[in-house]
Amino acid sequence: MILAYILALMILCYVLAYIEELLPRHYYNYIVWGVIFLMVIISGTRPGTHVSDFVVYEGIFYNYDSTVNQLSIEATFLWICELFNKLGGTIRWVIWLYALISIPLKIYSISRLATPVVFLLAIPIHLGNFFQLHDCEQMRVAAALSLGWYCFLLKTQGKKWTWIPFWLVAISFHHTAAALIVPLLITPDRALSVKWRVGMVLVILAGIFFWITKINPITTLPIPYIEAKMALYELAISRGEHPDMLVLHPIVLLRIITFLYVLFFYDVIYERLKCLNIILICEMLGLFCWFGLSMTSVFAVRMSELFEETDCILFASVVYTVTPSWAGKIYPILFSLYIFLYGCKVNQFGFL
């Protein structure tokens, strides 16, 4: 049933996207908070029996003080588990708390980064993909990325360096959020020059080059943490736990095409969306990680997912490049339906 609720919310957003120009401006805040409320309910009530991470989290909840968990799990999650455990709670308490932390902050940030129409087209894309993956499964990553979204908002608003404490808190929820420092540091405050845009394409081509030549850049980093993770990864490979990834996946190809399309119409879109710089840079980094780290599929998937959660705005921004406006909304809607239907085959919630 969870997929039915997600699809219903997606359809509601489609309808609102087509009538948003007829609604009073103050209705936008009501819509944003209504979306937040419904997404929190869906995430908090999701069936744990169908989600593999639920079993893992439940094991951590009752064994928060074990040596293995102390060494491998972020302290934030262990502290929350310990508190709720001593209060007589269950893992469901933790799920609700993480939903209340991640979803409101993330959706609020998206609503302030995007215009109303882009927001209403971006939410179905998020619902069809990363909402299910992160907010309904990998809740530690979801909490970290919600703070990442807020950092992007502060960065876009020109509030220099105020994002640093939020980025540090994001790392405390999940260590992979440390990588968000890259787009936060390199994203310029002004419009991207032609040289910048060409450079972004070259970065993606460099990732493709690493994939074709089977060069793994991550193994050249002399960092003990990465070396330890690589050793664990190679052990998992020997056990057959991590099958090869489909590098030229149709969704990845659509991301590349959309990235190049938005880059071509950059000037048109940037006038409406000042967040476009950081969205494009995150997509560039996500595509680079997907191809460049494909020799270690776990790293490639995890790092690309970290950056590409922002692609909901990337795809929705296409609306400003097509006239009439109703026609520009078709592509984001079709893409959101495609990733949703594809997810019905591979996610862990069962079919409609």
Image (tube, rainbow, N blue to C red):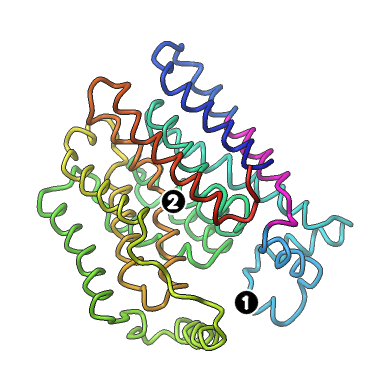
Picture disc at residue 309: 2
Image quarter (top left, top right, bottom left or bottom right) of the N terminus: top right
Task: Give me the residue at 42% from left, 11% from top.
Answer: 22
Q: Which residues are magenta?
A: 35-50
Q: Residues within 10 Å of mark 2 (few under 14, many from 20)?
A: many
Closer to the camera in the image, 81 or 201:
201
Residue 138: percent from left, percent from top: 60, 58
Residue tagged by mark 1?
72
Rendered view: 227 above or below 19 = below
Q: Amino acid at mark 2?
A: Glu
Q: Give the CA distance from mark 2 to mark 1.
A: 24 Å
Closest to the observer: 177 or 324? Answer: 324
User: Is residue 44 within the magenta segment?
Assistant: yes
Query: Who's the residue at 78% across and 51% down the image?
Result: 93
Q: Is residue 160 left or right of residue 15?
A: left
Question: 261 left or right of 77?
Answer: left
| Marks 2, 1: nearer the viewer | 2
**Quadrant of residue 246 within the rendered picture:** bottom left
For the point 54% across and 82% down, which residue is it? 240
Name the image quarter holding residue 61: bottom right
- Residue 152 image position (x, y, % from top left): 39, 47
